[in-house]
Image (cartoon, rainbow, N blue to C red):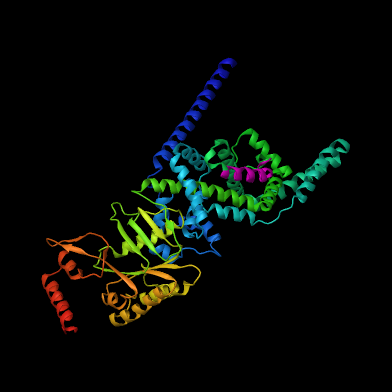
Amino acid sequence: MVKYYIAIIVVVFAIFLYNSIQFRKRELEKLRKKIKEGFGTPPDREYEAAEFDKIAAYYKKNAENTFSIDDITWNDLDMDSIFMLLNNTYSSAGEEYLYKILRTPEFDEEVLKERDKLATYFQENEEETFRIQEVFARLGRTKSISLTEFIDRFLGLGKRSNLKHIIMDILLAVSLVMLFVNPIAGMVMLIVMVFVNIGTYYKEKAEIESYFTCLKYLMDMINCGNALIKLDIEGISSYIDTVKSDLDKLKSISKGIFWISMNGNSGSLGEIIMEYIRMLFHADIIKFNAVLGATQSNLGTVEELFTTFGKLEAGIAIASFRKMLIYTCKPEFTKELIVDTDEIYHPMIANPVANTINESRSVLITGSNASGKSTFLKTIAINSILAQTIYTCTAKSYKTCFYKLYTSMSLRDDLTNNESYYMVEIKSIKRILDSINDEIPTLCFVDEVLRGTNTIERIAASSHILKSLADKNALCFAATHDIELTNILENIYSNYHFTEDVKDDDVLFSYRLLSGRATSRNAIKLLNIIGFDKEIVNEAENMASNFSRNGEWEVL
């Protein structure tokens, strides 16, 4: 009968073990399929509103003392969408590092070439790339706060001594010995020490338990590093050497880590026994304090490990980004203030119209509403950022200078500070003027300069603001509806325009950049096409024609 029950238990255990193995196998196959199909395709991940604060933590921590893309420019160009298109990463280290490099353009081409070298390797060796992504997928992303903040919180605890806990362990051990020397005194001492140790344990455990999650992620990083080493991939050997060196310095952290329960109490007999040992001898607190001290002593090593992981995953993201696009090129940098590009397009547009421009002067773009002016400005600006961050441009060729980049485009009233659109606009433009110096050239983009004020003052002020930008160490791309500016600034700015065709009560845009100033307007035509009353449209056209002839508006 006993053998029968034992056989049942063995069979049940075997079934459980088999199902567990099969489940893990299916999950691994699912992950590998996701990685393979996701490489070179737009990521389908959805982001919560607060998630970007978490992703941006590493950038914000390292943003001081270096030029970075400010919030106005970042939002004008909708760079969050560009980041999401690029973000084929699986760990917090990867996405936090990728976000950071997009916000901080490089001015050292050697750094960019190193990123390119890594990305090119991943492009040409997809099987190795998928194996690396599998490792980072196991590291995963933090949930509530960033990996950077986890590490900072952990280190923020300060120094914690184990002397008190060691003394209490010695006294507990002495009380056990006393049981054999003087049983009554030993029992009294043992009871006292058990109560003291347990009471102290729960008091101190409550202070540090929330940091166990931070420690778990640190351990996950160490495990990730060991897994990368085991892959033995020659193409990333220099990065793996750094990981090996870092893990060697962090050996003391993982040694004896089993004393700390980081996954909750499983309820098993072994875990229950371990929990009593921890309570009586403070084993997990002592180990936690030791790990904290070792981590604080090796802060640079932990940060270097984080950076190495970030570089590897960012390289994979760049390779995936290049694969998903129609075509890309690597930028050519020169000391001339120039933007020379062939067949450049916006990476977020499904069926983009590419344009070509070669300019060493500032540029003024005119054209009808919705003809492509703003999109073209954003296309050049985004590619300037991509050139100096991921060494990749969405063009057939792109020759440029190392620039600081600013925009003043998608502005709005600031109700929080009770500021009108015009105040917001002039402050935005002033920040560009204030940023210009002789050290690093500025590339700036202004859409509808001073649109928040009346025509006469707008043209007068705009012309001198744009002249001031062009006269300094800067290249300016500006879009305007004010044709007058094309004449006023023709000795300083090169004129380009976009136009349209009106056929069968429809407006057809080519989105092609053309030389010279615009000669057509379509605002009133659009009123007709979308169904405004014919009388309104006709009278508006007549009024505009009369003003063009006489220079005066008729009174209604």
Secondary structure mostly seen in the magenta stretch? helix
Which one is in front, 390 or 267? 390
Which one is in front, 228 or 200? 228
Residue name at image x 15 percent, y 61 percent: 506
Q: Is residue 239 rendered magenta in the image?
A: yes
Q: Position of residue 13 (x, y in %)?
A: 54, 24
Residue name at image x 82 percent, y 44 percent: 189
Describe residue 309's horizontal placement relative to residue 190 as left or right.
left
Q: Position of residue 447 (x, y in %)?
A: 34, 69
Describe residue 114's horizontal placement relative to residue 157 as left or right.
left
Position of the N terminus by quadrant: top right
Q: Position of residue 546 (x, y in %)?
A: 14, 80
Residue most toward the right? 181
Describe residue 505's horizontal placement relative to residue 194 as left or right.
left
Q: Is residue 80 rendered magenta in the image?
A: no
- Choose top left, top right, bottom left or bottom right for residue 230: top right
Q: Is residue 353 visible?
A: yes
Which one is in front, 155 or 172? 155
Q: Is residue 324 above or below residue 389?
A: above
Q: Is residue 88 visible?
A: no
Q: Position of residue 249 (x, y in %)?
A: 67, 46
Position of the C terminus by quadrant: bottom left
Q: Which residues are magenta?
A: 238-255
Q: Is residue 377 above or below residue 214?
A: below
Residue name at image x 35 percent, y 62 percent: 378
